Image: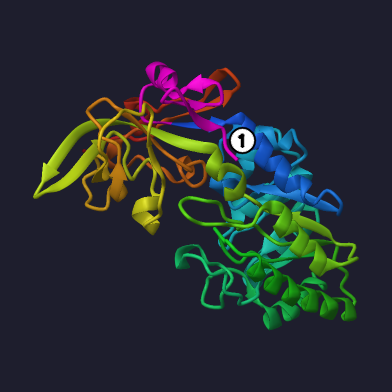
Amino acid sequence: MHHFHYRKNELYCEDVPISSIAKKVGTPFYVYSYATLKQHFDAFDGAFSDVGHLTCYSMKSNSNKALLALFAGRGGGVDIVSGGELYRALNAGVDPIKIVFSGVGKSLSDLEYAVTSEILMFNVESPQELLKLNQVALNSGRKARISIRVNPDVDPKTHPYISTGLKENKFGIGVEEALLQYEKAATLDGLDVVGVSCHIGSQLTQTSPFVDALRKLKKLIEQLVRMGISICYLDLGGGLGITYDNEAPPHPKEYAQDIKSELASSDWTLILEPGRVIVGNAGILITKVLYAKTSYDKNFFVVDAGMNDLMRPSLYGAYHGIQPVKQTPGEKLTADIVGPICESGDFLAKERLVDPLAPDDLIAVMSAGAYGFSMSSTYNSRPRVCEVMVKGDRFEIIRQRETFEDLVRGESIPDFF
């Protein structure tokens, strides 16, 4: 459930009309519903309330620190993939002991920052990373808690660009190789082996791939126990999908039940890394129509948001619902919703049946809370948009719109010109 709805043909976020936000902050902008974020986090976290677990929000999906603070205040941690995400998390007040560090390309400075921050665990993705992390920990006089991210070669049945658990993907270590690396890790003085990790992909709409991966992890843990290596944490990653169009993903309760049934009476602490399922339908992108255009009998609505603001349609061919902020009578027409970027791939929707629109009309691009702002850029020297959060009948800007001055901050012209 989300809290975007119409009242007398006007789109609201909770109790605030979208048009009133647009008048204050301009367009384009992202707007998030506090009630939806809270509800989705509690639904996911609560589904595992009867087992030992830690919900580590996957902040790559949306890393605004207002969201991080909200989830941390409800007992959550975060899953990070860079030193910058670690900085954001700590700045937002996330407890370091609730932070897990994933990612296939952790730099030396990333490892040093995370080791000295004393985070909960590193999900190690290669033999060379294992050795580098060990040396970093020894140099700092600390021990780094680790799991190895196992690539279980399970088909997640999702878009190939967001599949991460097949043997052709760059992520993790194969099951047989993982055993050798666990054996090696147990001999390294800078490391403390505490967990097993996997993540098979994003936007999954079935629970069976999760269960298949879990079964492979259980067999691996049995082998580790026989080797004298005890495991405290089982990190199952994230990946549960949402409804963008006609998808019918399982409810977190169904997902949790299938996972818990497979685990039976194990005493591992589960680490769960939901991202999209919490924030995806909690945010929308608001944009304004600039021009209505017909070319060779094809209709276009040119809007002031582009692929730099929301990359998913251009990158994945992803679907986002398009809704008018103010519903008006009239016959719908088929049109492309396109942006101002100088690329043919700059579109938000193609061949979409939409309400009749005119310049200055506002439209909402739905289900844009995940991988929207976090993947945005300043391509074509377009400042990144502002972000707004609504709670009840109030709203606040949680990220200011960038300025032209922001675009050149840090740049300089060499003296030798």
Foreground: 415 or 149?
149
Residue at 80% across, 53% down: 141
Looking at this view, is 243 or 82 the one in front?
Answer: 243
Q: Quadrant of the N terminus?
A: top right
Q: Compared to 176, does 22 lie above or below?
A: above
Is 252 rendered above or below residue 39? below
Amino acid tagged 1: Thr
Where residue 276 appears, as percent x and y from the top left, is 57, 49
Query: Is any part of residue 90 visible from this angle?
Result: no
The answer to which of 164 and 99 lies nearer the viewer is 164
Disc 1: which residue: 36
Q: Nearer the viewer, residue 54 or 333?
A: 333
Q: Is residue 351 left or right of residue 104?
A: left
Vertical placement of residue 339 versus 403, above or below: below
Magenta stretch in the rendered image? 1-29
Residue at left 69%, top 52%? 252
Percent coordinates x, y for residue 7 in the rendering: 48, 24
**Residue 240's spot in the image, x, y percent?**
61, 57
Number of other residues with Cα within 10 Å of mark 1, as a class: few under 14, some 14 to 19, many 20 or more: many
Q: Is residue 294 visible?
A: yes
Specify the quadrant of the image occupied by residue 2.
Answer: top right
Question: Horizontally, is 382 left or right of 248 in the view?
Answer: left
Name the residue at the bottom extreme.
Answer: 176
